[in-house]
């Protein structure tokens, strides 16, 4: 008995639109803005709306929102995501300046400024390591410094609910408590670091 097989099963078949290589990169969809939905002319009552969403871990969550209101089928149903408007300062000449960060915490060797999902960390100290903890959601940052101080906590802003600083041997630890689940990125910037949540 003869068997037919492709020479390399990991590459797409000839004539396929798929790329001729494999990748583990995840394509991030474009940000959602709005969508218009038309309903059939027989519809008179909107009973509910169901949202099917993908979580950070790839699992899928469904949420049903009961509505039970009468609708006119001539009108489209619009679903949109409303962005939070940034806070802006106004100059004397009424020109808008770019949004500013709000001071959250300040110590002689480090200070924190928050704006929406960004946290500016002003320090000359080197970041040794960073990691995330869950239940509750926290980001942990360790900075190199031989110092001595008592543990101190500060109320945060936006998704950064609380910032706690604790002293350790040869370094100090910053614990940032979040208001929910996020992924985060931290990168060096002028005068310190910038932490972004997604």
Image (cartoon, rainbow, N blue to C red):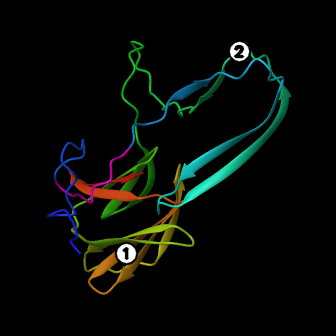
Where does residue 23 sit, x and y in percent of width and height? 23, 57
Which residue is label 2 attached to? 75
Q: Nearer the viewer, mark 2 or mark 1?
A: 2
Picture quarter with the N terminus: bottom left
> Between residues 187 and 66, which one lies in front from this camera angle?
66
Q: How many marks can you see?
A: 2
Q: Earlier in the sequence, mark 2 or mark 1?
A: 2
Mark-to-mark CA distance, 2 and 1: 55 Å
Residue 183 is inside the magenta segment: no
Q: Which mark, by number, is residue 108?
A: none
Magenta part of the protein: which range? Answer: 21-28
User: Label 1 crowding class (10 Å Cα cut-off): few <14, some 14-19, many 20+?
Assistant: many
> Between residues 175 and 46, which one lies in front from this camera angle?
46
User: Label 2 crowding class (10 Å Cα cut-off): few <14, some 14-19, many 20+?
Assistant: few
Where does residue 38 sit, x and y in percent of width and height? 65, 21
- Report which quarter residue 150 is drawn in: bottom left
Residue pictured at 36% horizontal, 71% vertical: 131
- Report which quarter residue 89 is drawn in: top left
> Between residues 146 and 34, which one lies in front from this camera angle?
34
Q: Is residue 132 left or right of residue 134?
A: left
Question: Is residue 137 shown to the viewer in this render?
Answer: yes
Element on which disc 1 rests = strand
Residue pictured at 34% horizontal, 76% vertical: 172
Which residue is label 1 attached to? 173
Q: Main secondary structure of the magenta part?
A: loop
Question: Is residue 179 shown to the viewer in this render?
Answer: no
Instruction: Single out the residue that lies furthest toward the front.
Output: 1
Element on which disc 2 rests = loop
Where does residue 129 sit, x and y in percent of width and height? 28, 73
Residue pictured at 48% horizontal, 32% vertical: 86
């Amino acid at each position: 008995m003869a068997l037919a097989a492709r020479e390399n099963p990991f590459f797409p078949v000839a004539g396929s639109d798929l790329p001729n290589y494999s990748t583990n990169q995840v394509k991030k969809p474009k940000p959602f803005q709005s969508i218009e939905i038309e309903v059939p002319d027989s519809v008179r009552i909107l009973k509910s709306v169901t949202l099917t969403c993908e979580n950070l871990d790839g699992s899928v969550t469904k949420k049903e929102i009961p509505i039970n209101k009468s609708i006119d089928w001539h009108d489209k149903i619009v679903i949109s995501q409303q962005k939070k408007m940034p806070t802006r300062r106004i100059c004397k000449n009424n020109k808008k300046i770019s949004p500013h960060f709000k001071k959250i915490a300040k110590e002689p060797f480090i200070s924190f400024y928050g704006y929406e999902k960004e946290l500016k960390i002003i320090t000359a100290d080197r970041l040794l390591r960073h990691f995330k903890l869950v239940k509750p959601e926290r980001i942990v940052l360790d900075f190199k410094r031989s110092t001595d101080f008592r543990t101190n906590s500060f109320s945060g802003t936006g998704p950064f609910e609380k910032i706690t600083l604790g002293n350790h041997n040869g370094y100090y630890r910053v614990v940032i408590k979040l208001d929910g689940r996020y992924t985060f990125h931290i990168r060096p910037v002028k005068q310190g670091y910038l932490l972004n949540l997604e």
